[in-house]
Structure formats: C-alpha cells, structure tokens
C-alpha cells in the first residue's frame, strides 16, 4: 500500500490543508457559531454527515477522505438519515481538527454571512470558498492563484483582528 507521504496527490492535500488552517483560524476569530447560532438545538448546521468530500472529480478527493479516516476514523460514506454529524460535540462543536470537507470548511449560514457583512464589512460567499477548495482537490489551481486565494483569506483574518482590537480599545 502507498503511504500518505508518497501519494501522488500529496501536493494537492498540502495546499488544501493550508487553506483549511486559515479558514479555521478565520471562523475561530469570528466566534459566531458558539454564541449566536440561530438554531437552538446545539447542533447548528452540523446535522448530517457533511464531512465526506463528494464530487465528480475522483480520484483526487479520495486522498482527503482517506487521510481523514486514517487520522480520525469515522464513517466513509455520506449519510443524511442522522441527527448530527459523527464529529459534532454539543459541548464544543466540531471535533475534526483537520481534513474537513469543502462543504464543512466553506459553509456559513445566512445569519453568519449577514453578521460578517454587518460587523466586519466582509462579503463572504461560501460558494466562492468551496469553489477554490474543490479546484485544489481537482488539481486545477495554479501556484499564483493559490497565493492569491491565501492572500484573500489572510486579509479577511486581518480585517476581523483589526475590528476586534478596536472594539477592545473602546471597552
Ligand atoms: S454556520 Fe450558522 S447554523 Fe451553522 S453553527 Fe454557525 S451560526 Fe449555526
Ligand atoms: S465535520 Fe465538523 S463542521 Fe463538518 S458537519 Fe461534522 S461537526 Fe460539522
């Protein structure tokens, strides 16, 4: 069996994980889901098995699904007949620290999108973000496009940071 490091799509996975890290940092800074989720069931939008990457662009997606399963276990098939995601904890949210699917990484409900606009003047489009992530998985993202996307996410992080520090100075 080919080890994950020798996998022909290692580069694809590295790029994907790099963006994932930035997106997780971004949402952690915004901290909307913990306190302001409009869905009061404690599960929020993590009500199904969204963590399995799906799409027509096999076989590259397998590297993400395979690595996620190797590191964290869990089911390998998407399921919609469940009440909450296998990785969701009502106390602390998503237990998957990496290798989330593009659906999970990009998703923001309408309330969160509105919040980002109102609070930080950020136009966040989940479809754009998902498109970029999937483009990586398809092996179709060029080096300069990747740098550009990274810059855009870093700018979003910087905008939120700046806004939050201004708020802290006022209080
Ligand atoms: S994205 Fe929206 S629905 Fe999902 S947990 Fe956050 S606030 Fe709740
Ligand atoms: S993997 Fe995480 S973000 Fe995705 S549905 Fe499950 S708990 Fe939610």
Image (cartoon, helix red, strand yellow):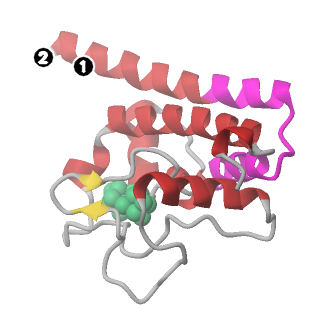
Please determine whether, in this image, residue 44 is positioned above or below residue 144.
Answer: below
> Which portion, as a residue range, is magenta?
127-152
Q: Is residue 153 left or right of residue 7?
A: left
Task: Identify the disc placed on residue 145.
Answer: none
- What residue is rendered at 59% in x and 38% in y? 17
Q: Quadrant of residue 8?
A: top right
Let me know if residue 163 is in the magenta part.
no
Let me know if residue 137 is in the magenta part.
yes
Q: Identify the residue position indicated by label 1 in the image.
A: 167
> What secondary structure is the stretch in magenta mostly built from?
helix
- What residue is rendered at 19% in x and 49% in y? 35
Picture coordinates of residue 6, whole percent (x, y): 74, 40
Circle 1 crowding by C-alpha within 10 Å: few under 14, some 14–19, many from 20: few
Quadrant of picture, ligand 1:
bottom left
Q: Is residue 117 left or right of residue 88?
A: right
Task: Identify the disc placed on residue 171.
Answer: 2
In the current view of this chain or complex, which residue is farthest to the front? 1
- What residue is rendered at 52% in x and 49% in y? 99
Q: Where's the C terminus, which quadrant? A: top left
């Amino acid at each position: 069996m080919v080890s994950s490091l020798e996998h022909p799509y290692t580069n694809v996975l590295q790029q994907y994980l790099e963006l994932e890290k930035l997106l997780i940092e971004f949402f952690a800074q915004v901290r909307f889901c913990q306190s302001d989720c409009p869905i009061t069931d404690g599960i929020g939008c993590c009500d199904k098995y969204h963590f399995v990457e799906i799409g027509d662009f096999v076989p590259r997606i397998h590297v993400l699904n395979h690595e996620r399963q190797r590191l964290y276990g869990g089911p390998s098939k998407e399921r919609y007949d469940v009440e909450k995601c296998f990785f969701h904890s009502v106390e602390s949210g998503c237990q998957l620290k990496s290798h989330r699917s593009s659906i999970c990484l990009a998703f923001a409900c309408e309330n969160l999108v509105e919040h980002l606009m109102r609070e930080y003047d950020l136009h966040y489009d989940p479809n754009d973000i998902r498109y970029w992530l999937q483009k990586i998985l398809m092996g179709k993202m060029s080096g300069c496009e990747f740098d550009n996307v990274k810059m855009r996410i870093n700018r979003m992080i910087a905008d939120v940071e700046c806004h939050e520090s201004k708020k802290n100075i006022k209080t």
